[in-house]
Amino acid sequence: MMAAQKRKGLLFANDRFGYYPDSFYAATANLLPEQPVLQGHETCDVCIVGAGYTGLSAALHLARRGFAVRVLEAHRIGWGASGRNGGQLGSGQRLEQHELEDLVGVTRARALWDLSEESKALVKGLIAEEKIDCAYKPGVLHADHKASYSRFSRDYVEKLERDYGYQHLTFLNRDAVAEQLGAQGYFSGVLDRDAGHLNPLKFCLGLGRAALKAGAVVHERSPVLDWSSVSLRGGEQGYRIKTPEGSVSARHLVLACNGYLERLNRAVARRIMPINNFIVATEPLGEAVARSLIRDDVAVADSRFVINYYRLSEDRRLLFGGGENYRYRFPSDIRSFVKKPLLEVYPQLEGTGLDFGWGGTLGITRNRMPVFMKPERNLWTACGFSGHGLGMATLSGKLLAEAIDGTESRFDLMASVPSPVFPGGTLLRWPLLVLAMSWFALRDRL
């Protein structure tokens, strides 16, 4: 068992070692049997650090291609953001298409759009192919909390239809939003009928089952302490990865840690900032009350910089995400922390019980686009999904498998997107982030 003094950093700051958080998702999921702790020395073609969407998707697609794969997970499959998030499968990249066109040009922006569409199709396809019971439902409504945003939303619907042939969006005026939501403070919105929402932990566990069935090996409760480059048989560069009770030698190393990357690679970590986000689950509300909150059972995400996002669960709870902090530690009372934004949106829920409250750490980037990097030979990473990871992180695993198997063009397309470092180095970047986030949060209220 891992020595207590080794349990440092974000991986161990807010949770018990090797246990899922006390979330609605963990309480209702059909969890996988515990996978063995890595003990002794093993060899494989590819070692993957992290058993979330990226790592498990990479393991699945690599195993299907005949690679020997081992996944090292510090806690349990789906323990991190992949099993704690809002469960929204959105369209597009994290940046909207006009922003991408300005950043990388129209041609590459179109190629990035096509990848994002593939990411949705991949998630839906895996659910069907692997018979993953994760309560997938169609529809995401993007709600505007300022009247000045309405014109942009209408224009963006027209742009995606005109320039990208995307026919699944409907602009909603204030009255139409009010018909959909019993919520306060929205002036307009866009309904995306091809986006959707699901139980994120159940989907991640389904990915884990599929990867294991394909032949990948997963080691839980096996946090990586260190890794180093080594010369393999034949002189090729490879890697030796150390855990508390064992080690792995592999030709390829994939860092699939997102917000928990920390010190595993400095070049990548400088581009990722971990932040914490929080969700509550109400008591079951019953069909009538639930439909009065979200009539058509779609997911909702609003236009605030510190976003509110919410949806109904399978048993008619409201799952509401709101509030962030930028420290290692979660608030001592997450339910109270999230209750304030919840009641600002749904004041009629005053007095409603909150049965669960949990937090999670995600990785954001300066421009909100993910970081795809190959820092050195046979070392790969895809991370920093900035709250848009359900589809793109799952696709990133497929792109990593393609690249490791020798076809790097689509990985390189993602890697070609600029990925600026956070200013301030290790000492100042956290205070600078707090200042920036506080300013944007203030702007939400103006």
Image (cartoon, helix red, strand yellow):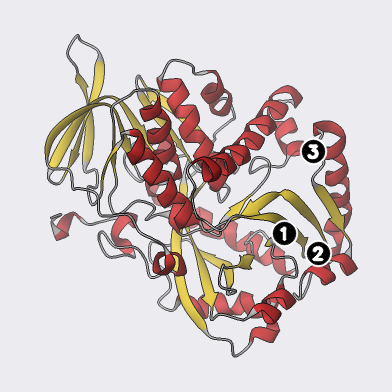
Q: Position of residue 234 (x, y in %)?
A: 19, 9
Secondary structure found at label 1: loop
Identify the element where label 2 is drawn. loop
Closer to the eye: label 1 or 3: 3
Q: Is residue 341 left or right of residue 22?
A: right
For the N terminus, which image quadrant? bottom left
Image marks 1 and 2: residues in contact by CB distance under 8 Å = yes
Indicate which label's residue lies in the foreground, 3 or 2. 3
Q: Which residue is mark 2?
A: 146
Query: What's under tag 1, amino acid-wise?
Result: Ser
Evaluate if marks 1 and 3 touch, with contact meaning CB atoms under 8 Å apart. no
**Can you tell which quarter of the image residue 66 is in?**
top left
The residue tagged 3 is 166
Point out residue 330 in the picture as x, y percentages from the top left corner: 41, 68
Residue at the limit of the structure toward the top, as seen here: 234
Whether residue 71 is situated above or below residue 346 in the rendered picture: above
Front residue of 363/300: it is 300
Residue 32, percent from left and from top: 32, 54
Residue positioned 74% across, 65% down in the render: 296
User: In the visual, does 92 lie left or right of 396?
Assistant: right
> Where, by quadrant of the figure, is residue 358 drawn?
bottom left
Is residue 366 at all visible to an observer of this figure? Answer: no
Question: Residue drawn 40% across and 21% down?
Answer: 404
State the separation of the CA atoms marked 3 and 2: 25 Å
In the rendered image, which residue does mark 1 sit on? 303
In three-dimensional space, the C-alpha distance between marks 1 and 3, rounded to whole angstroms, equals 21 Å
